[in-house]
Amino acid sequence: MGSQARIGIIGAGGWLGKAFSQSIVEAGIADAEALTLSYRSAKPDVLPSATWTKDNQLLVERSDVVIVSVRPEDFPAVRVSAQGKLVISVMAGVTLEHLARHLQTDRIVRSLPNGAAEVRSSYTPWVASEAAGEEDCRIAQAIFESCGTSDRLATEADIDYFTGLTGSGPAFPALLAAAMMNHAVARGINRDVARRGVNALLVGAGRLAELRADCPNDLVETFMAYRGTTAAAMDAMRAAGIDDAVGRGLDAAFRKSIAMGHADAEAPQPTASA
Ligand SMILES: NC(=O)C1=CN([C@@H]2O[C@H](COP(=O)(O)OP(=O)(O)OC[C@H]3O[C@@H](n4cnc5c(N)ncnc54)[C@H](OP(=O)(O)O)[C@@H]3O)[C@@H](O)[C@H]2O)C=CC1
Ligand SMILES: O=C(O)[C@@H]1CCC=N1
């Protein structure tokens, strides 16, 4: 398909939809003119030379590749037939089987990017249905790598696990940073100073991880080896159960993703129409 790929994004006005549409154009996978983008409420003020529409069936007809980027609870209302088309889903918890049944195509890639797609730094694991061919997988991977890095995983259960690990993942350093900021403010530190300091350390820690490419355990051991303030803090955090808390969080996300898939399976069959 190369630079002539015709790509449609259902839900292109949202966080991930906007990130994908822009990164696809930036990476030269498709020109803006070859994109058909759908929205539900307000027409977004980006990529004016793309075709914007509220008609998802029209979008499918104008596209070779259809990316579905609505929230899972809005998916049942997306009533289109994508017969013969490659569909790429970024939705949490929606299974390959449900996607195939609802959209009437067996060429499916199920993926789970993360919010860092906005800054072209997502990590996007994905799986493909049996009927998705080599070229389908190649274009899907090119799309994911236009906004970060990606890996093809072995099973759908792996996708359900990675939904928490890396899909929800950017929220977890944010949770730690919020706890640190709340602690500093409670200690009487000026809120703006605390915010600048904590945001700067998040960015710095990310860049350090990128530069060193160490296993996180190695980085922790490097800090522990000082046997100083950092080790004192980490020992106290571990004694308070940080490893257990993180494990419980990841298990909860995995269970939620599986439960969303089961809810789909029990949902009534849609009637396909524009
Ligand atoms: N954000 C994240 O970090 C991640 C999100 N995901 C998954 O990606 C998907 C999208 O998430 P995100 O971008 O954050 O969500 P958003 O709510 O930001 O975007 C969803 C968009 O879909 C639009 N929409 C809903 N129904 C339709 C429809 N029938 N036709 C056209 N557009 C429609 C919404 O419009 P309106 O303005 O009317 O609401 C909204 O703009 C979700 O399924 C989520 O599970 C996966 C990994 C990470
Ligand atoms: O929280 C969610 O359900 C979505 C999927 C992963 C990140 N956001």
Image (spheres, rainbow, N blue to C red):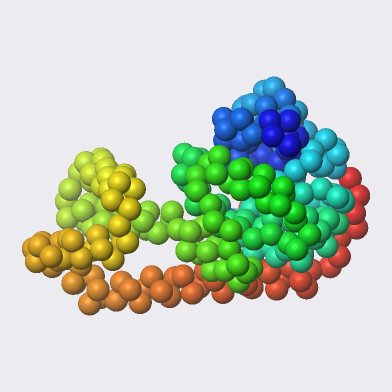
Position of 26 compared to 270: left or right? left
* Quadrant location of the N terminus in the rendered image: top right
Give residue 260's quadrant in the image: bottom right
Q: Could you tell me which residue is drawn at 69 percent across and 59 percent down? A: 128
Of all residues, the one furthest to the top in this rendering is 49
Q: Could you tell me which residue is drawn at 68 percent across and 30 percent down? A: 3
Q: Is residue 221 visible?
A: yes
Judging depth in this view, the residue of 215 and 252 nearest the camera is: 215
Q: Position of residue 183 (x, y in %)?
A: 23, 58
Position of 202 compared to 140: left or right? left
Judging depth in this view, the residue of 111 and 52 nearest the camera is: 111
- Looking at the image, residue 54 lies above or below residue 104: above
Q: Is residue 91 visible?
A: no
Q: Position of residue 163 (x, y in %)?
A: 55, 62
- Looking at the image, residue 169 lies above or below residue 118: below
Position of 28 compared to 263: left or right? left
Q: Could you tell me which residue is drawn at 73 percent across and 62 percent down? A: 129
Judging depth in this view, the residue of 13 and 86 nearest the camera is: 86
- Looking at the image, residue 134 lies above or below residue 97: above
Judging depth in this view, the residue of 7 and 43 nearest the camera is: 7
Give residue 43's quadrant in the image: top right
Give residue 2's quadrant in the image: top right
Position of 204 compared to 26: left or right? left
Q: Could you tell me which residue is drawn at 17 percent across and 61 percent down? A: 223
* Quadrant location of the C terminus in the rendered image: top right
Q: Position of residue 10 (x, y in %)?
A: 72, 43
Total numbered circles: 0
Q: Position of residue 214 (x, y in %)?
A: 30, 57
